[in-house]
Each structure stands twice: as structure tokens, then as C-alpha cells.
Image: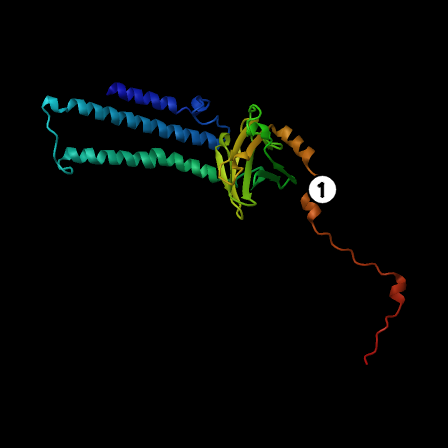
Amino acid sequence: MRGLFRAGLGAMAAMSSAVALADYKYNFPTPVTPIAHETLHVHNLFMAIALTLFFGVLALMLYSFWKHRKSTGHKAADFVGPKSTKQWMWTLAPFAALLVLDYGVFGIPAYHAVKMYEDSKTAAELVVKVTGSQWMWQYEYPAEGIKFTSQMTTPRAQINNKEPKGENYLLEVDNPLVLPAGVKVRFITTSNDVIHSWWVPAFGVKRDAVPGFLREFWANIDTPGTYRGQCSELCGKEHGFMPIVVNVVPKEEFAAWVAKNKPAVSPAASAAPVAAEPAKTSAVELATPVKVAAAK
């Protein structure tokens, strides 16, 4: 039993390292945001404890089957419900342990992760509006006056198996979303038609885009690079053709991109109503008497 306990501790220590297992193809992708790091940590913690309990209980059951087998003269107990102090302890101790695990070990990290995920208004330096449509994404930077659509560019010949599949099959677009690294970005999602869902695994975020509603989340990407995702809500016959590509660049490069793509006149300025100038009246018109028709 001591060896089993040590093995369980070793498994927990190995799985508690989020980054160490992040590149393993059957695990989560490498996290690049605080939310993704926290999600992977909670996942690995849950899995480590669950596996330790599973193998521990399994080993105890197998040991009991072998130790108290009928061939050695043991007789099965026929009691119903706990009667002695020892029986009550065997009943209440696992219950108390589960309470501690559920509310302490599992509950607190999960609550912290959810609270972090929902904090979308604190110290956001950039706002991006994401609008889902059948079957494309529309991105808008309200403060910068930039707005564009993003559609899949995978050739139909590859989809119809007439050409070899590309490296980023079904995960390539014409206009990727561009974001700065190390900046807290507030995302606002909505939809023009049906429910979509904006999901980038490396960011650890997934938020439904619901028509008629504005929903929000945030991300602070710490590593520049290209990250890909997909619509994760069944939205029609071409649901699988709504990829997401995000190019994360340094702040200086993002500022240059904004300057290049920002319209000469911001939409807010062009849409502002212009006050009509009062009509100018000439001196001749002022001097001319106004004839008023007499009432008949």
C-alpha cells in the first residue's frame, strides 16, 4: 500500500505541471492566455486526483477480494447498514473526504477559473466585436474604425478530394483577426442569423454568438504567433467551413497594422450629423417690404 501511495503522489506531481504536458497531442494545446493556463491546471488537478482515487480504490478492492476470499474460510457479512463505530467510520469518512474534494480541492480552483473567465470589463485596452454569419466571421475594432469579414479559403477541390489536403485544411482564411500580444482584449460576440460559437483552443475561450444579444469575454495573449479555431456550434450546412485564424503580433507591429488599415475618416466622424448653416439673407432682401395679402 505504501508503494501505491508513492505512485499516486508521483502521478499527481507529474500531471500538475500544465506546461510539461501541454504539447502532448492528446492533451490541451499549449496555453497562451491566463484563462487557458488556469483551465489546464484545473483539468490536470482533477485528472490527477480522479486517477489516484480510481487506482487506489481498485487496488483496495482487489486486495479485499484476495484477502477475504471464500477458500480461506471467510464468511461474507450479512448486515444491513452500519451498526458499530468502525462501520460508521467507514461510511462517514469517504463522505467527508468527498466533501473536502468537491468544495475545497475542486470547487475553489474551478470558481477562480470561472471568475477570471467572466471578468471582461477590467482594464481592457482593446475592444473587438465578433459577429457570426452563415458562414463567415465579421470583425470590428470600434475605437479604431476598422471592420472586415473573414472567410475560409480552402479550395473546393481539396474538400471534394480532387486535390491533396493542405497543411491548414479547413483552417485558413482570407482576412485573419490581428491582435497585439500582452494586451487585455475585450471581445463582444453577436450574430446576424443563427447561433454560432467563437472558439480558439489555445486561448482557452469559447463564447456563443447569439442573435439579438451581446455576449463578452476577454483574452490576454502572452505569445505572438498564429492561432486557429472553429465555430463550435452547429449552425447550418456549412458549419464546418467557419474557421478562425488569429495573428498575434507585438504591440509595435499591431500599431503599424492599425495605421495602415484605419480609414482616413473614422466612421463615427462621418456618421455624425452636420448642423445646417442658417440661410444668408442679402441686404436687398432685408430692405424689401413683405407684402401681406389682406384677408377677404
Q: Is label 1 in a helix, a strand or a loop? A: loop
Point out the residue furthest to the top here. 3
Which amino acid lies under the numbered mark 1 shown in the image of this protein? Val
The image quadrant of residue 290 is bottom right
Is residue 127 shown to the viewer in this render?
no
Q: Quadrant of the N terminus?
A: top left
From the image, tell me which residue sits under label 1. Answer: 265
The image quadrant of residue 224 is top right
Q: Nearer the viewer, residue 81 or 76?
A: 76
Q: In which quarter of the image is the C terminus?
A: bottom right
The vertical placement of 243 against 16, above or below, is: below
In the rendered image, residue 116, in percent from the top left (x then y), is placed at: 46, 37
Task: Give the class, few, some or many, for how many residues have Cα within 10 Å of label 1's Cα (few <14, many ≥20).
Answer: few
Does 194 sit left or right of 60 as displayed? right
The residue shown at (60%, 27%) is 250
The vertical placement of 2 against 181, above or below, is: above
In the rendered image, residue 188, in percent from the top left (x then y), is placed at: 55, 41
In the rendered image, residue 164, in percent from the top left (x then y), is placed at: 56, 23
In the rendered image, residue 105, in percent from the top left (x then y), is placed at: 34, 33
The residue shown at (55%, 39%) is 187
Point out the residue furthest to the left here. 73
The image quadrant of residue 166 is top right
Does 43 sit left or right of 91 as displayed? right
Q: How many marks?
A: 1
